[in-house]
Amino acid sequence: MRIFARRQRPLGQPRLSAFARVLALGAVLGLSACAISCSTSATNSPTATATTAAIAAPTTCNQLPGFGQAGPLPQAGNILGGIPFLPNSVYTSLNPVAGGTPGLYGVQLMQTCTSNSSVSAVYASFTGRLPGNGWPQSSTYPYDGGYQAPCVDPYCWMRTNYREYLSLEKVTDAGNGLVTYGIRIAVPPSTPDCSNIVPPPGGTPPLEFFWSQQPSIPVPPLTAEGLYAGHSVGAKTVLSQSMCSPGTAASVTGFMSTELGKLGFTSTSQSLCGSTGWVIKNGLAISWNAGSATDWTLSYCQ
């Protein structure tokens, strides 16, 4: 005969009643249920839904960063009216980025977003329509408001009758048919009366460079060229050209000093062509005397 010994409870441990055991089992089952239902509830909570919506790709231009306040085409004189803008577009404000002081172009930049479009369609619209609206392509652009620098890409134009410049920049696919790009506009300074130096019937067209010598010599925007005179200094010939420019004597001097310095002309204290105060590059010496913006003299010799 087998004798079964009854396992004794440790001293001090109370006996669980049947009711207590039921409560314990219910708690375990409840925790398991919460692990499933609470997880589902958290996923479907308003916070989770908002997070999911926040990372969804924008479907309208105003949802893109920087375009929250963009709207219809701003009014800024007749220059914008001469540009064949695309439909379904919104624009930021025109922001000054360079120039705008006496004698310089006022350069402004605005950001544009076009919906239901593509990068190729934006390029095609500007390149195809601007020339027919009086904007032939330009190889240069006055990015700093003065010097006609080479255009950084093939997308620069100049409205010939007004001497205004336009550059199409950073055309970018933002997804969902949204395309963003910059439009840089340069508005010229007012042209002064140059009848005091320009011979009739009106002289030559406005200059951006003085082409008589190489390397080319930049001159302030819309400078008019008058008569010139020459004299000999030893074996050299000094030519002095009368010039008339927008702005002031200070703006003419500032332009010449800044832009010739950028192009590698260096100052020298030597008497190169019968006097001091010349800048030189590759044997070409330049000097200027800007007593007045509308009657100043550009001299050069080699």
Image (spheres, rainbow, N blue to C red):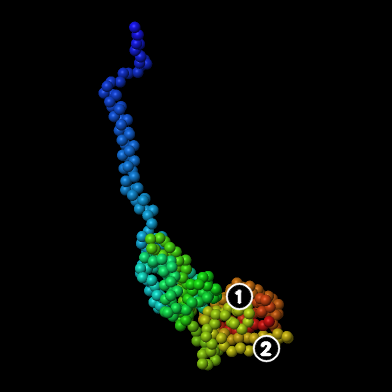
Mark sitting earlier along the chain (2/1): 2
The tally of labels here is 2
Rate crowding at label 2 as few (under 14), some (14 to 19) or many (20 or more) other CA atoms within 10 Å.
few
Residue 45, label in figure = none
Label 2, secondary structure: give it: strand
* x 52%, y 84%: residue: 206
Position in image of residue 176 (x %, y %): 38, 61
* x 37%, y 68%: residue: 89
| Whether residue 31 is situated above or below residue 18 in the rendered picture | below
Tell which residue pokes out farthest to the top in this image. 1
Answer with left or right where residue 193 lies relative to residue 29. right
Position in image of residue 266 (x %, y %): 65, 73
- Disc 2 target residue: 231
Answer with left or right where residue 262 lies relative to residue 107. right
Answer with left or right where residue 70 lies relative to residue 272. left
Q: Quadrant of residue 196?
A: bottom right
* x 35%, y 68%: residue: 88
Tell which residue pokes out farthest to the front in this image. 1
Marks 2 and 1 sit apart, C-alpha to C-alpha, by 24 Å
Q: Quadrant of residue 77?
A: bottom left
Q: Quadrant of residue 43?
A: top left
- Disc 1 target residue: 260
Position in image of residue 25 (x %, y %): 30, 27
* x 31%, y 42%: residue: 41
Look at label 2 and name its amino acid.
His
Tell which residue pokes out farthest to the bottom in this image. 200
Look at label 1 and name its amino acid.
Leu
Label 1, secondary structure: give it: helix
Answer with left or right where residue 171 lies relative to residue 14. right
